[in-house]
């Protein structure tokens, strides 16, 4: 049976979920109509295996309505390549974790954070030797790579409880394999998983969660994922930047309003064929957080912790001044209110 038409119908139904939301998505009340055309009709985004980035994938259904005629998802080959592609100008913007851009901004890389999107997709798994974050002192943590979101976020957590992440924890990388598997194989005492990884560890009955950023304060107060863009792209294309960001934030609303539909979309598009895992991620991540919280609070919180841990040279004020641009988010919050 040809299921392509059925998949298309499901996608259209997904994007139409809720009368008010459906009207906004399909342009019945679309601020883009009154705006100038985007400076470029080409947009390059990241394709990575993290389904907490679902709004970025759903956004492809909205980009034509925002004036884009040519968009592509760059398939990244490693867990660092997405943010590297933004830095290098091979990608214009992407959803990414909130923490890994911070050291890059400190190093003067040409990236800018535009908005927070959601919270709640990171969970800290440990073995039976560890029951609290403080007990990680002198233990081993598995990370995908140094400077990645898992490494930087866990460093912030360690610094928060007075542990020096540079000297008092032993870090091991996946060494060509997945860091989750290194933890599962007993090579580390801790692993901070996100997107599908927590669900996968639970299926294997590996470890136990000692910290859940969807539930445990202060971490539950802050964004786990943001939208980051290449600075030159933003400077040259402010209208296109706003239009692309609007597509992502509208899609975040879809994920919040209809997590079941979002999980079906991910399965139809082969982003995550295991529907129960996709649904767990869609229900865990708080996709309406972009409307409610100030992303600057998230960055300042982690910047203070990381500076205390000796991982940053610049002050939070300096980093926020050179590494953020909230004007598009401020405009979109007013336009998409309600």
Image (cartoon, rainbow, N blue to C red):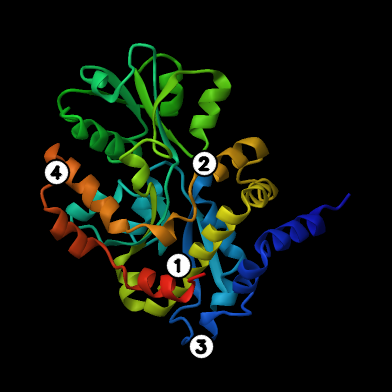
| Lower position in the chain sequence, tag 2 or tag 1 | 1
Mark 2 against mark 3, which lies toward the viewer? 2
Real-space Cα separation, disc 1 to disc 3, in angstroms? 17 Å
Residue shown at the point (33%, 40%) measured from the top left: 219
Between residues 38 and 213, which one lies in front from this camera angle? Answer: 213
Q: Of the residues under marks 2 and 3, which one precedes in the sequence?
A: 3
Residue at (52, 58) in percent of width and height? 252
Instruction: Classify residue 144 by image quadrant.
Output: top left
Mark positioned earlier in the residue sequence (1 or 3): 3
Rounded to the nearest angstrom, the CA distance separating label 4 from label 1 is 30 Å
Q: Position of residue 45 (x, y in %)?
A: 47, 60
Quick one: label 4 or label 2, which is nearer the N terminus?
2
Q: Would residue 232 be found to the left or right of residue 169 on screen?
A: right
Tell which tag, 2 or 1, sits nearer the viewer: 2
- Give me the disc on residue 245: 1
Could one spot residue 32 in this view of the protein?
Answer: yes
Which residue does the image show at 39% across and 75% down from the upper left?
331
Q: Where residue 51 is drawn, which disc sits there?
A: none
Task: Relative to 236, say whether 309 is above or below.
Answer: above
Q: Which mark is residue 284?
A: 2
Q: Is residue 213 above or below residue 114?
A: above
Query: Is residue 177 in sight in this rendering?
Result: no
Q: Secondary structure at mark 1?
A: helix
The residue pinned by badge 3 equals 34
């Amino acid at each position: 049976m040809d299921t392509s038409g059925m998949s298309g119908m499901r996608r259209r139904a997904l994007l139409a979920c809720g009368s008010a939301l459906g009207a906004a998505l399909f342009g019945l009340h679309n601020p883009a109509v009154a705006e100038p055309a985007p400076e470029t009709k080409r947009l390059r985004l990241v394709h990575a295996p993290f389904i907490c980035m679902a709004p970025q994938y759903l956004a492809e259904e909205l980009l034509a309505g925002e004036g884009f005629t040519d968009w592509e998802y760059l398939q990244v080959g490693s867990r660092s390549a997405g943010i590297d592609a933004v830095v290098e100008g091979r990608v214009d913007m992407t959803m990414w974790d909130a923490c890994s851009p911070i050291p890059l901004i400190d190093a003067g890389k040409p990236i800018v954070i535009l908005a927070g999107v959601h919270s709640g997709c990171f969970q800290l798994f440990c073995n039976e030797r560890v029951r609290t974050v403080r007990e990680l002192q002198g233990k081993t943590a598995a990370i995908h790579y140094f400077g990645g979101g898992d490494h930087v976020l866990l460093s912030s957590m360690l610094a928060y409880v007075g542990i020096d992440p540079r000297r008092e924890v032993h870090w091991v990388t996946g060494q060509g394999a997945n860091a989750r598997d290194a933890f599962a194989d007993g090579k580390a005492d801790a692993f901070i998983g996100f997107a599908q990884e927590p669900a996968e560890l639970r299926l294997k009955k590996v470890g136990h969660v000692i910290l859940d950023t969807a539930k445990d304060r202060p971490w539950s107060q802050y964004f786990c994922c943001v939208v980051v863009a290449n600075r030159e792209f933003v400077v040259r294309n402010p209208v296109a930047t706003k239009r692309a960001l609007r597509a992502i934030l509208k899609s975040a609303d879809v994920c919040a309003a209809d997590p079941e539909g979002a999980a079906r979309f991910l399965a139809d598009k082969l982003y995550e064929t295991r529907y129960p895992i996709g649904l767990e991620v869609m229900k865990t991540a708080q996709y309406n957080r972009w409307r409610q919280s100030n992303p600057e609070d998230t960055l300042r919180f982690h910047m203070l912790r990381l500076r205390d841990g000796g991982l940053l040279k610049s002050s939070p004020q300096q980093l926020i001044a050179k590494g953020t641009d909230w004007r598009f988010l401020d405009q979109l919050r007013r336009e998409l209110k309600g």
